[in-house]
Image (cartoon, grey):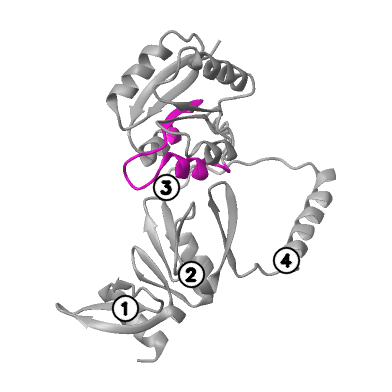
Amino acid sequence: MPKLKTLLVHPDPEVRTALRDVLEEVSFVQVLGETVSAFEALELLEAIPYGVFFVGVDLPGGTSGIEMAQMLAGRKNKPALVFISDSESQAYAAFELGATDYLLWPPAPGRMARTMDRLQTFKTRFREVPPPAPYPAEPDDEPSEGGEQTVKLPLPEEEQDSFLAALQAAWDQTSNRRPEIDKLAVNQDGRTILIPYDQIIFVEAFEDYSYVHTANQKFLSSHRLKNLEDRLGPHRFFRVHRKYLVNLDMVTEIASMPGSNFMLRTAGRTRIELPISRRRIAELKKIIGL
């Protein structure tokens, strides 16, 4: 029977070595890699259908194991998460995010056996996602100049009317769709928090994710900055830099800096300064009427 592909995500090499020694004796798991940061783990998950992550609560790189679990929350066929920590402080948050287990390290005698029992139960419902199979090419499929082919799928005449009716219904539903609320949903400690747009000061790009900054807190979002730019742009947000999207209603000052550079400052008890790229300053001045 296929084994659960396992990734060890922990900054301490001694912990990873001890885990390898234990898991070598388990017949239904197979350790396929080690890493120390959440983003390395997420990159590996794109290439390998892991079934289990043994993950430390505290990870380097600015993203904790709990935050990584939040990123995986909406993913189908996500791996089981076995958290490893030296304290119970994050256990509630871990289980709220669907953790399979939470191990205090080093584990007490016999404790690892309970973890294996839980993983065995998880294995009965875990299914690896097979790679998509290409469509079979028909003899008369002509490749385009870029080497691409058009796949022609036949539609029987008796189904054409229902197909067109379905398209019309989809169009009507889209046309009558209610506008989205002016709030951004983010996950925080297993909860979904709705942040009003007018409370967002700026958004900061971080790898394939982003941080949403308010006056008192920042929230990790699974959205790329480009996606948030498309969504927030109509609500007076402006991309001042490749890394920053700012709420123009929060801007109080644009300052000239040495070397023909510019910086903007925002409102709030804590003054925030953000750089403006040279190629965007002209567009920004035009927007605010300078």
Rendering coords of residue 170 (x, y %):
75, 58
Q: Which mark is residue 200?
A: 2
Which residue does the image show at 49% across and 55% down from the upper left? 223
Residue linked to disc 1: 264
The kind of residue on which mark 2 rests is Ile
In the rendered image, the vertical position of residue 152 relative to residue 210, given as above or below: above
Query: Viewed as shown, does residue 169 lie left or right of 36?
Result: right
- The kind of secondary structure element at disc 1 is strand
Rendering coords of residue 231 (x, y %):
53, 66
The kind of residue on which mark 3 rests is Gly
Residue 148 is one of the magenta-drawn residues: no
Query: Where does the magenta region start and end?
Result: 45-74
Where the C terminus falls, by quadrant?
bottom left
Label 2 to label 3: alpha-carbon separation: 43 Å
Pick whichever of labels 2 and 3 is earlier in the sequence.
3
Residue 50 visible: no
Pick whichever of labels 3 and 4 is earlier in the sequence.
3
Crowdedness near tag 1: few (<14), some (14–19) or many (≥20) residues, C-alpha within 10 Å: some
The reply to whether the C-beta atoms of the residues labelled 4 and 1 are less than 8 Å apart is no
Pick whichever of labels 4 and 1 is earlier in the sequence.
4
